[in-house]
Image: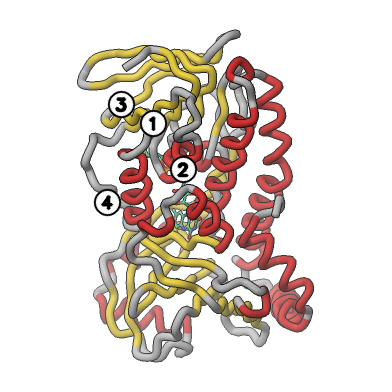
C-alpha cells in the first residue's frame, strides 16, 4: 500500500463507500480506511428510508440493481394523534414512480462493499484511524492496522466516520431532543401496500415504513420511556402501539427484536475544519430520523464532493479553493435539511393545545394546497439543490 494518495476516505460506511464509488475509474488514487474487520457483516438493526432522489444517485453509482430486499413507498400518510388534521402524499401527484424505498442498513452496506471490491479503489478493513492533521500541502493520517501504526499522506482527507474522530478537537454543536428511537419489525392484519405512515404524538414521532409483508417501526420516546419499552412483553408492546397508532393497518400481530438509538442534532462547526480536510455524512451533520433525511443528505454530500474532485486538476484537489466551492455547493441543502428536520421535531413533539390546533390546521392546509405539497415533497426527495 502506497503511503500517499489523492483522496483518503476515513470510514467505509454508506456515505464514505458511496463517495469512493463515485470516484472509481477516475485515474485518481483513492483509499478507504474502515475500522471494521474485513468480511464482518454489519449488524446494524436500523432500516433506512431512501428518497427517490437517492435511488437515482445509487443507479448512477451502479449499486441500485444489486440491492436486495427493497420495498417501495408510493403513499405517505402524515397525521397527529388526537387531532383532525392529516396530509397524504401520492407518487402520481408528484409525477414520480415512487416516493421512496425501505431497506435494511446492512443490505445497503453489503451492496456498496461488493461494488467497491470490484473497483480500482483500495479498501483497507480493520484500519482504525487514530489521528488526522491538516498541513499546508496535504493531510497526514495516522492509523492502526494489524497492530502496526501507519501514516498516509493525502491531498484530501474525507472524514466519513460518523463523527467521532474530530469531535474533541472541533466539538460539534449538539442538541439533545431528550428522545430515543425504538426500532423493530412488526406485522399487522391489514397492511396497506406501499404506504408509509408518519404520526406525530406528544411523546415524539412514530413512523411505520412498509417493508415486505409488514412494517419497520421507528417509535420515538423520552430516553427513560424508550428503555422501559424494551422490557415490555410482546403482547403489552403491541397493545401500547395499537393505542398510540390507532387501527389504520388493522390489528398489530407480532413484533421482532427491539433496539434503541439515542437521538440528537449534532452538527460540526465547519464542514472543512482544517486544510485538506472535509467532513461528510453523519460526521458533518447527524439528524433526527423523523424525516428520514440522514443518509439521503449524506449521499448528496458524497455526490457533490465527487463532482468537485472530478472537476479539479490533480494539483487542485484538497486546496482551499476546491473546499470553498464544495462548501458553497452544499450550504443551502445542508441548512434547509437541518432546519426542516429540527423544526418538525420541535413543532410536533409537544402537547400545547393551541400549538396542536395550529399543527392540525397546517396539515390540512398542506393537503389542500397541491403546489405547497409538491414543494415540500420535492425538497424531501431531491434536497434544496434539486
Ligand atoms: C434509528 C435511525 C433511523 C434512521 N433512519 C434513516 C432513514 O430512514 N433515512 C435516512 O436517510 N437516514 C436515516 N438515518 C440516518 C442514517 O443511518 C445515517 O445518516 C447514515 O448511516 C450515515 O452514514 P455515514 O456513512 O455518514 O456514517 P456511519 O453509518 O456511522 O458509518 C461510519 C463508518 O465509519 C467507520 N469508522 C468509524 N470510526 C472510524 C475510524 N476511526 N477509522 C476508520 N473507520 C471508522 C465505522 O465503522 C462505519 O463503517 C437513521 C438513523 C437512525 C439512528
**How much space separates mark 2 and mark 4, taking CA atoms?**
19 Å
279 left or right, relative to 212: right
Horizontal and vertical percent position of residue 61 = 47, 47
Q: Disc 1 designates what residue? A: 121
Q: Disc 4 designates what residue? A: 43
Where 363 falls versus 204 (above or below)? below
Horizontal and vertical percent position of residue 154 = 48, 17
Query: For the point 44% across and 26% down, which residue is it?
Result: 30
N-terminal of the pair, mark 2 or mark 3, is 2
N-terminal of the pair, mark 2 or mark 4, is 2
Do the residues under discs 4 and 3 have CB atoms within 8 angstroms? no
Query: Dot 2 lies on which element?
Result: helix
Horizontal and vertical percent position of residue 276 = 58, 19
**How much space separates mark 2 and mark 3, taking CA atoms?**
18 Å
92 left or right, relative to 138: right
Do the residues under discs 2 and 3 have CB atoms within 8 angstroms? no
Query: Dot 1 lies on which element?
Result: loop
Ligand 1 within 8 angstroms of badge 3 C-beta: yes
Q: Disc 2 designates what residue? A: 18
**How much space separates mark 4 and mark 3, taking CA atoms?**
19 Å
Horizontal and vertical percent position of residue 111 = 34, 51
Query: Dot 3 lies on which element?
Result: loop
**How much space separates mark 4 and mark 1, taking CA atoms?**
24 Å
- The answer to whether one can see residue 166 in this image is no
Query: For the point 77% across and 71% down, which residue is it?
Result: 372
Query: Which numbered dot is residue 127?
Result: 3
N-terminal of the pair, mark 1 or mark 3, is 1
Ligand 1 within 8 angstroms of badge 2 C-beta: yes
Instruction: Give neighbour class at mark 1: few <14, some 14-19, many 20+ (Cα, 10 Å).
Output: many
Q: Nearer the viewer, mark 4 or mark 3?
A: 3
Q: Viewer-proximal residue, 85 or 379?
A: 379
Amino acid at each position: 500500500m502506497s503511503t500517499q494518495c489523492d483522496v483518503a476516505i476515513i470510514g467505509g460506511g454508506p456515505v464514505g463507500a458511496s463517495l469512493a464509488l463515485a470516484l472509481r475509474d477516475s485515474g485518481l488514487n483513492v483509499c478507504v480506511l474502515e475500522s471494521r474487520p474485513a468480511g464482518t457483516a454489519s449488524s446494524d438493526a436500523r432500516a433506512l428510508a431512501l428518497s427517490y432522489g437517492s435511488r437515482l444517485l445509487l443507479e448512477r453509482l451502479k449499486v441500485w440493481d444489486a440491492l436486495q430486499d427493497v420495498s417501495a413507498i408510493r403513499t405517505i400518510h402524515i397525521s397527529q394523534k388526537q387531532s383532525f388534521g392529516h396530509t397524504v402524499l401520492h407518487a402520481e401527484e408528484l409525477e414520480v414512480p415512487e416516493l421512496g424505498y425501505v431497506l435494511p442498513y446492512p443490505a445497503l452496506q453489503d451492496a456498496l462493499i461488493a461494488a467497491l471490491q470490484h473497483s480500482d479503489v483500495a479498501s483497507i478493513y480493520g484500519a482504525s484511524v487514530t489521528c488526522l492533521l491538516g498541513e499546508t500541502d496535504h493531510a497526514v493520517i495516522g492509523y492502526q492496522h494489524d497492530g502496526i501504526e501507519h501514516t498516509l499522506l493525502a491531498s484530501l482527507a474525507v472524514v466519513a466516520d460518523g463523527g467521532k474522530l474530530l469531535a474533541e478537537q472541533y466539538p460539534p454543536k449538539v442538541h439533545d431532543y431528550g428522545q430515543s428511537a425504538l426500532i423493530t419489525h412488526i406485522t399487522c392484519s391489514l397492511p396497506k401496500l406501499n404506504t408509509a405512515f408518519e404520526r406525530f404524538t406528544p411523546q415524539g414521532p412514530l413512523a411505520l415504513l412498509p417493508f415486505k409483508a409488514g412494517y419497520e417501526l421507528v417509535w420515538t420516546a423520552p430516553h427513560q420511556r424508550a428503555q422501559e419499552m424494551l422490557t415490555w412483553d410482546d403482547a403489552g408492546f403491541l397493545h401500547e402501539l395499537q393505542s398510540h397508532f390507532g387501527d389504520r393497518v388493522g390489528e398489530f400481530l407480532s413484533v421482532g427484536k427491539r433496539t434503541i438509538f439515542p437521538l440528537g442534532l449534532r452538527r460540526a462547526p465547519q464542514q472543512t475544519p482544517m486544510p485538506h480536510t472535509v467532513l461528510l455524512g453523519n460526521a458533518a451533520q447527524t439528524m433526527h430520523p423523523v424525516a428520514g433525511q440522514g443518509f439521503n443528505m449524506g449521499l448528496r454530500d458524497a455526490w457533490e464532493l465527487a463532482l468537485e474532485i472530478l472537476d479539479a486538476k490533480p494539483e487542485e484537489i484538497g486546496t482551499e479553493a476546491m473546499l470553498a466551492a464544495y462548501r458553497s455547493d452544499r450550504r443551502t441543502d445542508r441548512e434547509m435539511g437541518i432546519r426542516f428536520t429540527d423544526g418538525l421535531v420541535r413543532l410536533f413533539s409537544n402537547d400545547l393545545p393551541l400549538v396542536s390546533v395550529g399543527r392540525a390546521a397546517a396539515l390540512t392546509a398542506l393537503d389542500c394546497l397541491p403546489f405547497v405539497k409538491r414543494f415540500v415533497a420535492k425538497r424531501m426527495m431531491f434536497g434544496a439543490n434539486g
